[in-house]
Amino acid sequence: MAYQYILDGIYNEVIQIENTGKVADYIPELAKIDANKYGIALVDKHQNVFTKGDALEKFSIQSISKVITTSLIFSKIGNDLWERVGYEPSGNSFNSLVQLENENGIPRNPFINAGALVVADLMLEHFENPKAFLLDFVRELTENPNINYNENVAQSEKAFGYRNAALVNFIKSFGNIKNEPVAVLDFYYHQCSIEMSCVDLAKCFQVFANNGVIPKSDKKFLSTSKCKRMNALMQMCGFYDQAGEFTFKVGLPGKSGVGGGVVAVFPNHYTVAVWSPKLNKKGNSFYGLETLERLTTETSLSIF
Amino acid sequence: MAYQYILDGIYNEVIQIENTGKVADYIPELAKIDANKYGIALVDKHQNVFTKGDALEKFSIQSISKVITTSLIFSKIGNDLWERVGYEPSGNSFNSLVQLENENGIPRNPFINAGALVVADLMLEHFENPKAFLLDFVRELTENPNINYNENVAQSEKAFGYRNAALVNFIKSFGNIKNEPVAVLDFYYHQCSIEMSCVDLAKCFQVFANNGVIPKSDKKFLSTSKCKRMNALMQMCGFYDQAGEFTFKVGLPGKSGVGGGVVAVFPNHYTVAVWSPKLNKKGNSFYGLETLERLTTETSLSIF
Amino acid sequence: MAYQYILDGIYNEVIQIENTGKVADYIPELAKIDANKYGIALVDKHQNVFTKGDALEKFSIQSISKVITTSLIFSKIGNDLWERVGYEPSGNSFNSLVQLENENGIPRNPFINAGALVVADLMLEHFENPKAFLLDFVRELTENPNINYNENVAQSEKAFGYRNAALVNFIKSFGNIKNEPVAVLDFYYHQCSIEMSCVDLAKCFQVFANNGVIPKSDKKFLSTSKCKRMNALMQMCGFYDQAGEFTFKVGLPGKSGVGGGVVAVFPNHYTVAVWSPKLNKKGNSFYGLETLERLTTETSLSIF
Amino acid sequence: MAYQYILDGIYNEVIQIENTGKVADYIPELAKIDANKYGIALVDKHQNVFTKGDALEKFSIQSISKVITTSLIFSKIGNDLWERVGYEPSGNSFNSLVQLENENGIPRNPFINAGALVVADLMLEHFENPKAFLLDFVRELTENPNINYNENVAQSEKAFGYRNAALVNFIKSFGNIKNEPVAVLDFYYHQCSIEMSCVDLAKCFQVFANNGVIPKSDKKFLSTSKCKRMNALMQMCGFYDQAGEFTFKVGLPGKSGVGGGVVAVFPNHYTVAVWSPKLNKKGNSFYGLETLERLTTETSLSIF
């Protein structure tokens, strides 16, 4: 595939669309990002990297981190994970408490905030130094030792995070959080604050395109079955209440973050990451979705 | 692929699992089916047919018909369809009214009952003789001129169908049903009463595995993009509030019916239909799901 | 009490307030009413009648009829009634289906539409000729043999009543409607179509102010305890999701109808009926509520 | 009225009913109370005190305190209160988050936990030393200088109060809490920990039976209109999702607490307090409700 040619073409097309999205501004650290950034990186199955635009600039991955923590804990404890969190799409927005109340504190899936907080709680339970462990793992996947938490972002989220504080206390009232709310939130805000570039992100997700094997080291991180399930989860739950639309239009498993990043996985073919900070009304990158829809349509390649 | 060998193996394995499901008994016509029936049919991309068990016996396809009517109306009116019905998973059971009330009478997707009733309404709107038209189309896809409506089943559903009558009146109160409730229900109960065998069903869905082309005639029924979207819809919404579980465990687009049928599509590879009347608590065939989970696990082939 | 003086004063005050309400227009028969009608009638415990404005003109009592049918069936079957319908405020709008779904087809109370339909079903079950029986009873209470159903209104409601058709079918799907939906709706639309004046209405509700005794005949229609409970029901549930506001501002049990009528009961003191067709956003008569709030404030008399 | 005779009779009747309730055990301090305690105190309009059983023993008033704080803040800021909290019954259980989510952080009424937390926030806003102020006020109403907070209970509630922590953070995420969650919770847990006897409680609520005047000092604490509204609030919202049942069976404004206390107000007649720690499934004192239902039935006196 002439991926570079395709990326160039899509980039030039998308950049001419009026971007009606808005940068997330609930914390100052995210609000001050240059709204016009736009980058794409694609890594094919031979680990060739194709880029366009601001593909080397770091941004806050935010909710995309949920896929990484979930895969770590799934790899560690296996199907016990599903006693603490479900794998059904939520049908609601990302921080809804209604479903939790009706379903006794078991979040629908690990990619809504409630579920990610339960996963964070499990990380504290199962890893000695979870913050260091997570960072090491991300550096391994991205082959980039300079990946870090952004402490300002983490502190800022904490200062304004009343909704997440509500979620974690609420889940704890049902007994489905074992650690102290403050500790769970601290880990969660750190995982969300990780910064990387499109290239890092596309590399990071190669493990899911590669049957669970980390390409560089050839280490089997996830069994084939677990890897398939991670992709299924991304397919069903990666885009909050826009999961259907993403599946419908893009047809690939993926995950978005409020920092404007989107990553998608075409098993056995490629991973692709897009970054553009302006978000549509559902909280997903406006250009990110436009880019990926074009990619699968123009290559006529999707999982369907 | 040695499909016959695989089907034989799976069949022999599954038949030894205790089937804790229950036959649907809300209408007498479904309740009187032999609960122990179990058949599998797989049609590969060269139209080779592989069968095992009761694969030639007819059963009531019920909700599986929703895929066929949706594809007909999508083919006819294109994206106008999505002004009347969504393409997001519902996160609720198949006949819930709650979401409709919150979302002003626009059903979440065409595969929950509410959405299928809107599609039925559109069939009445856009085809002169929709019952005959649908039957002709199904006969064409299955290459079987003996496919028919089962009038007893249709009448029986009508006699007990207070929930569907509630749905159609409720949607009409929002203005999203144009015809008279009685006419919409009559068409809907007929489409659900269609009877076919596993072989018919696997053939019928070949069009979705074949980029929208009907294999026998080479006629392009759906554009590639529309075909991809039909598969995406099945992936996200084919199994009510068990959609996540099916995607997670099976990893293929598919659709189930309360008559015990399940059909799945592996684009560019095969279609497979299973029939076993005992249903799990979510209303999907217990053996059907066991069969398909094994099929994708043992072949290591799924879309993910 | 100088009731005439008080009514005159309130009338003159209220009529100068800008009426921001809107006449109900979901059926043509209601829409064509003169929006500026405004009448008040108060009947004291000695059956003295005080009137002001359009107090002798007939209007459609609509939901106010629910109090009458409920009292009839409560008088007939006693506490068995509460196995079919609750006595808790709904906290939702008058025709919501959400609660029904969560509570298995048992409506919260008899004054929301769902509950009134169950009461209508009970009327069909327990009275031979319920339409004639109801009319006779209303004529007895109002001492007015000219009270009638308005067939045009009843037919018009039926023609547009998809929401009520949804409700009755939905409740029947839970088994809490015994008769055919069509028959239940026919009775229900007739009861709502009863027409009477403010004077008729205030007389009609005297039985609830008089410990269950019909003043004219001295007949004990309801036991003291049942009468108290009817008033409690009106207090808690008489104004849909504005019940709290009415209790808060007016402090009397009462009931409103979409035809612009409101009636309130001050046990052992008086009944009062107001008619003004323009409704506030919650579907209660704008002037009606203004009038009653002034009445209890200026007389310093309420149940609290 | 021969109140002593009536109380004696009811007490002897009720004590023979099998008490199927259960003592609240979510914190150890409440769980260790003697489950068989049962006391009644009635204060008539001449301030005569009638008692029976354990009427002089102190217990934790818990949610009953919500009426007192609400009246303080209503007296202080008037109708501005209703911009922060509603006055409609909730139709849901006392600590539900669902409604809050749908209604943008404005609790339905001040007597559900969410509403009481907003009132607590207002107390911090409008009084310099709100804890001391509240205690002084309660001592004034009860004429008992020995009323105190129970620090053990307050600390224990705090240690287990994840649901309330969820509520206050959730409301703050909507902007309807101004102070820090920790400070609001501290005040809230203190107000709930106030201890008093049935006699204290019946005296404390005399102000609501007496048109807002404190009997001892003849001080006008609430205007007549505000007092009427406090009673209306208790009528509609005093018993969570059992408000209808209480109104229906008892027919008086009142409030219950999880410590087993119930208080009711018959304006211009009496106040009555009952204490019995075993609670029914809705969280209201089992004997408390039995006692009050008998009281209004046997005296034939209620507001209806």
Image: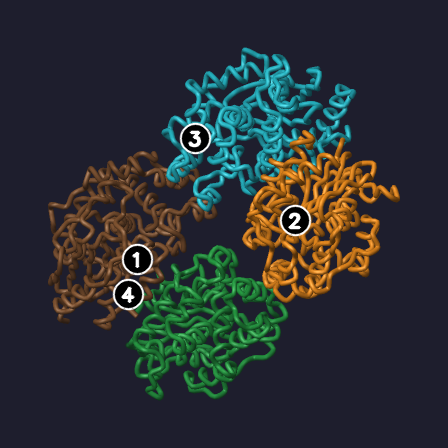
Chain colours: A cyan, B orange, C green, D brown
Label 1: which secondary element? helix
Pinpoint residue C13: horizontal percent, then vertical percent: 40, 68
Q: Are marks 2 and 4 in contact (CB under 8 Å)?
A: no
Label 4: which secondary element? loop
Q: Which mark is residue D250?
A: 4
**Mark 4 to mark 1 CA distance (whole Å):** 13 Å
Q: Are marks 4 and 1 in contact (CB under 8 Å)?
A: no
**Mark 2 to mark 4 CA distance (whole Å):** 56 Å
> Tag 4: Cα neighbours inside 10 Å, few (<14), some, or many (≥20)?
many
**Mark 2 to mark 1 CA distance (whole Å):** 57 Å
**Mark 1 to mark 3 CA distance (whole Å):** 35 Å
To which chain does the residue with label 4 belong? D
Q: Residue placed at 47% from the left, 71% from the top?
A: C119
Looking at the rendering, which quadrant does residue A57 occupy?
A: top right
Q: What kind of residue is marked 1?
A: Met
**Mark 1 — residue?**
D234
Pinpoint residue C43: horizontal percent, then vertical percent: 36, 79
Instruction: From this view, report whether residue D299 is shown above or below residue D21.
Output: below
Q: Residue placed at 61% from the left, 47% from the top?
A: B284
**Mark 2 to mark 3 CA distance (whole Å):** 53 Å
Looking at the rendering, which quadrant does residue B232 occupy?
A: top right
Depth check, front residue: B235 or C215: B235
Depth check, front residue: A7 or B21: B21
Q: Which mark is residue A160?
A: 3
To which chain does the residue with label 2 belong? B
Depth check, front residue: A137 or C61: A137
Q: What kind of residue is marked 4?
A: Val
The quadrant of the rendering that contains the N terminus of chain A is: top right
**Mark 2 — residue?**
B276
